[in-house]
Amino acid sequence: MHKPLLHAKAAATHMATAALLCAAMLGIASTAHAADLKSGLKIAFVPKQINNPYEVIADDGGMAAIKDFKGVGKVVGPSDAGASSQVSYINTLITQQQDAIVIAANDANALVPYLKKAMSQGIKVVTFDSDTAPEGRQLFVNQANAESIGRGQIQLVAKLMGGEGEFAILSATPNATNQNTWIKWMQEELKKPEYSKMKLVKIAYGNDDDQKSFVETQGLLQAYPNLKAIVAPTSVGIAAAARYISTSSSKGKVAVTGLGTPNQMRAFVKNGTVKAFQLWDPGQLGYLAAYAAANLASGTITGKEGESFEAGKLGKRTIGANGEIILGPPTTFDASNIDNFNF
């Protein structure tokens, strides 16, 4: 009677030991996979513009990741967000034989020939935040699904303006890939019958310049006296619009929303100028882009759909269609939660 019990106990012990061994082996495999990254990788980040607060946070996230895997990182880029302003930096990085270039593109097509030249010389190219045409890079690290960002912006502004009235969009540059993709989805969402009483009267461009965005806001309010909301899917634009409206007679009458960082928007939420806005963590975006570049440069991935890699504290990530990697859904910030975030 006791023998079967002993056999059962022995079997259970054997299975538990096997499971522990298996788990240990998986742990070793996982660690080995993370350790497959080459040491001393030279990775350069090229932001849209070097002094853009959003880009600084994103680049800092990239540098933190590079420090994690003992690479050599640097940030170089233009002070303006012009279509061709990043070209000279790309050419210099090619000459310096960087292992990877991580770039937030100012233009979908203008940079492609130069990035192709980089790739032909063995330099890995990852776009993040703002993509090029697919032939200009191996991977694109996207904040969130572009469709959900665009549609989400309309859903939010509809709520803020009671589902009816005139509103305008204050974008970055006319060529900004990410802005244009989001706006396309915003216009698509607007076609739904529940938005039939809302009218998009103007798409203005502040060129990701604080003063120009400020002046464009003033112009919108003058041109459209019945305006009920401004949507700025750019961190420079939303802050400039909020700053103008916060000291104008439009405060409390014209809603300001879009995409911005909690730290730059906190004062405007506290003083009632802004009720709600959205964003992801740009630091995590840069962090993920750096790990994607390091894995490409180390040969642990090639950029094909379905491949996975370890991205430090962000865990395992999988490459989707067209070399796209998604960070995650955006967060809506308002007075109830803005003090929980610091970036």
Image: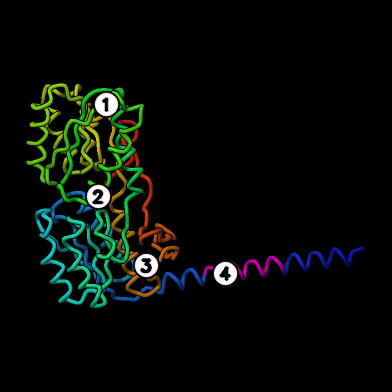
- Inspect the image, locate mark 3, and give the three-letter code of the amino acid beneath it: Gly
Q: Is residue 40 above or below residue 19?
A: below
Give the mark nearest the N terminus, 3 or 4.
Answer: 4
Residue located beneath label 1 in the image:
198
- Seen from the viewer's position, the closer of residues 327 and 51 is 327
Q: Nearer the viewer, mark 4 or mark 2?
A: 2
Pointer 3 with pointer 4, Cβ within 8 A? no
Q: Which dot marks residue 168?
A: none
In the rendered image, residue 280, in percent from the top left (x then y), is placed at 32, 46
Say whether residue 271 is visible: no
Q: CA distance from mark 1 to mark 3?
A: 42 Å
Q: How is the image coloured?
A: rainbow
Q: Nearer the viewer, mark 1 or mark 4?
A: 1
> Is 17 part of what is drawn in magenta?
yes
Q: Is residue 140 above or below residue 337?
A: below
Residue located beneath label 2 in the image:
178
Q: CA distance from mark 1 to mark 4?
A: 58 Å
Q: Circle 2 — which element?
A: helix
- Inspect the image, locate mark 2, and give the three-letter code of the amino acid beneath it: Asn
Q: CA distance from mark 3 to mark 4?
A: 29 Å
Give the quarter of the image for residue 256. Answer: top left
Say whether residue 315 is visible: yes
Residue located beneath label 3 in the image:
303
In the rendered image, residue 116, in percent from the top left (x then y), is placed at 22, 70
- Write the start and end of the magenta stretch as one range: 15-27
The answer to whether 202 appears left or right of 315 in the picture is left
Residue located beneath label 4 in the image:
24
Q: Nearer the viewer, mark 1 or mark 3?
A: 1
